[in-house]
Image: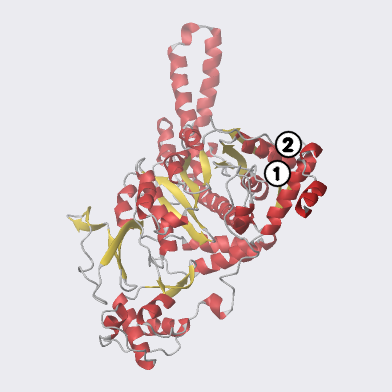
Amino acid sequence: MGKQKQELPSDPSQYTILKEGQADILMHGNDVFYNKTQVVNRDLSIAVLRTFVAKSKEEYAEMWAKKQGRKMGASGTQAAPVLAACDSSEPGASTPAFDHEINEAATVVNTAHLEKDNGVNNFSNGGAQSEVTDQVCEVSDEIAKPVIKRVREEPRPLRILEALAASGLRALRYAREVEGVGSVVAIDNDKVAVEACKRNIKLNGSVACSKVEAELADAKVYMLTHEKEFDVVDLDPYGSPSVFLDSAVQSVVDGGMLMCTATDMAVLCGNNGEVCYSKYGSYPTRAEYCHEMSLRILLACIESHANRYKRYIVPVLSVKVDFYIRVFVRIFTSASAMKNTPLKLSYVYQCVGCDSFHTQPLARTVNKNNSLRYLPGHGPVVPQECSDCGKKFNMGGPIWSAPIHDPDWVSSILSNVISLKSCYPAYDRIYAIMTSVSEELLDVPLYLCLHNISGTLKCTSPKAVMLRSAIINAGYRVSGTHANPLGFKTDAPMDVIWDIMRCWVQLHPVKSQPSDQSGSVILAKEPTLKANFTRAQFALSHAQCKKVPRFLPNPENYWGPKPRAGRRITNKHTSLMGPEFINNLTCQRESELPDAKRPKLEEADCKQDS
């Protein structure tokens, strides 16, 4: 049997109080996992949750107004209009709270009518039965009015599940900082973590005690046994979330939200392609756009799990931050809408010699006899050898090639962050991230890197504004990307990009290179497009014109991943934690030891002298 973890100490003096936002937690060494770096993750999640609450109210009010305006039929068809409200599965057509209320209202109607009929048929059973029948008749008469009035004018409070709670900091912040949250269930399969979570709940007062509930449970089993019960499910594991996705997509209500983090970036970025395929069902290509590709691999994986239950996802925000990626998706149920999934997936062809890449859609649609048919995608989109440099292609995917952000949500989240600046400890970071996200081209998957393109040709790199201007002057669109400060997204084909770079090299000659190199092959061709490097009007984004910082340095040293909970932190973790933290932890351990077990400094000095 494995070594069991020691229980947390009962002496309050042995704990350190950490404050983040409006929540406080007690920490003791590395017994329970905590990473200060993830404050950006938690702040961004709170901003998305606040937007989700506001959007849910808007959708609920719109549905309420629509149903109030619908005239009811005869009293015998009271339940039909109500049940019709559950038919629509399009985004924005229903809300989690509204679906719940509609089902309750319809159940009350049908039950009351059934009881009334039974009461009439059994009227001769006695006086008690007669009283019940009269009461049911009164209820039925009230139900003769529009049933939609039984639905609340406000959506019910959100029910959130934090599937991997650890210290419970995230759950506590959700409960205390987000209005409209009714309850948060924080679960963990580690007894020490659950004890720490319960202690932290008590530390944060009555609001936390009334809203947050800590349970010892396996996340996968818990979500499977609570099907369509939570409006929001948050997955933030240490490593890959792949083993939790199947149960998570079943636990979210229709129209609810799944928030998911992945920290196994080495796998997602292509260092272990076979491992990535086994976990996510997609093969990565090692290229400069690997961070965005990892986002699209995760989205495709979530979509695949959702499709098994006639559900599909709608991404509202997908970001790469520090050493991890984070996606926010809404989940809907519709067998017909699920058929569009192959249209949102593509394979990627990446040239091994240059930076050229091409996407191959998995499927296509055709209209035949006034009906929409789904067919396999045409291919291949590339020849056996790259038309730019003559090298072979590597193939990766499938990846999510549809938009990974919702512009309306991005705008609302950014507005919320700005208006509640003081509520976000990591305001500068999330403002910079959301500003960069708001500038991206949504319909262009993946991106190019200016330095990589110049490196292929062995030429001096042009300024970003000059390259952007040349692309815009050629009649195409261009934007930055939040995943790479030197990256740019454009709908210009690769032959246009290389023509622009050929024109640049003509103005800034390079040294002769061996003829078999990719750069030499590309430059040997004459450009068919005359590039215009004159400053274009929209070469710089709105944020760049205002000099808004979009890529900030780490706020402090050792800003990155941390060891797993329960691991004894030693000198080998100095690169992750920093020497100061290691020294303080060592002193704390020595102070907790009994006097008999403490090293005698005088004896140690004598031994060294001898």
Q: Position of residue 49 (x, y in %)?
A: 57, 51
- Mark 1 — residue? 28
Q: Pointers 2 and 1 in contact (CB under 8 A)?
A: yes
Residue 18 appears in the figure: no
Q: Position of residue 145 (x, y in %)?
A: 50, 35
Q: Between residues 609 and 84, which one lies in front from this camera angle?
A: 609
Q: Residues within 10 Å of mark 1 (few under 14, many from 20)?
A: some
**Quick one: label 2 or label 1, which is nearer the N terminus?**
2
Query: Which secondary structure, mark 2?
Result: loop
Q: Position of residue 104 (x, y in %)?
A: 50, 33
Q: Residues within 10 Å of mark 2 (few under 14, many from 20)?
A: few
Query: Which secondary structure, mark 1?
Result: loop
Q: Between residues 126 and 379, which one lies in front from this camera angle?
A: 379
**Residue located 43% across and 19% down the image:** 117
Q: Residue furthest left?
A: 369
Number of marks in the image? 2
Q: Amino acid at mark 1?
A: His
Q: Is residue 168 above or below residue 134?
A: below
- Mark 2 — residue? 9
Q: Residue furthest front?
A: 610
Determine the image quadrant of residue 505: bottom left
**Residue located 31% across and 75% down the image:** 494
Residue 488 appears in the figure: yes
* Residue 290 image label: none
Determine the image quadrant of residue 589: top right
Q: Between residues 590 and 44, which one lies in front from this camera angle?
A: 590
Left or right: 15, with 571 as reference point? right
How many angstroms separate mark 2 from mark 1 (CA)? 8 Å
Q: Amino acid at mark 2?
A: Pro
Left or right: 586, with 69 as reference point? right
Q: Position of residue 15 (x, y in %)?
A: 75, 44
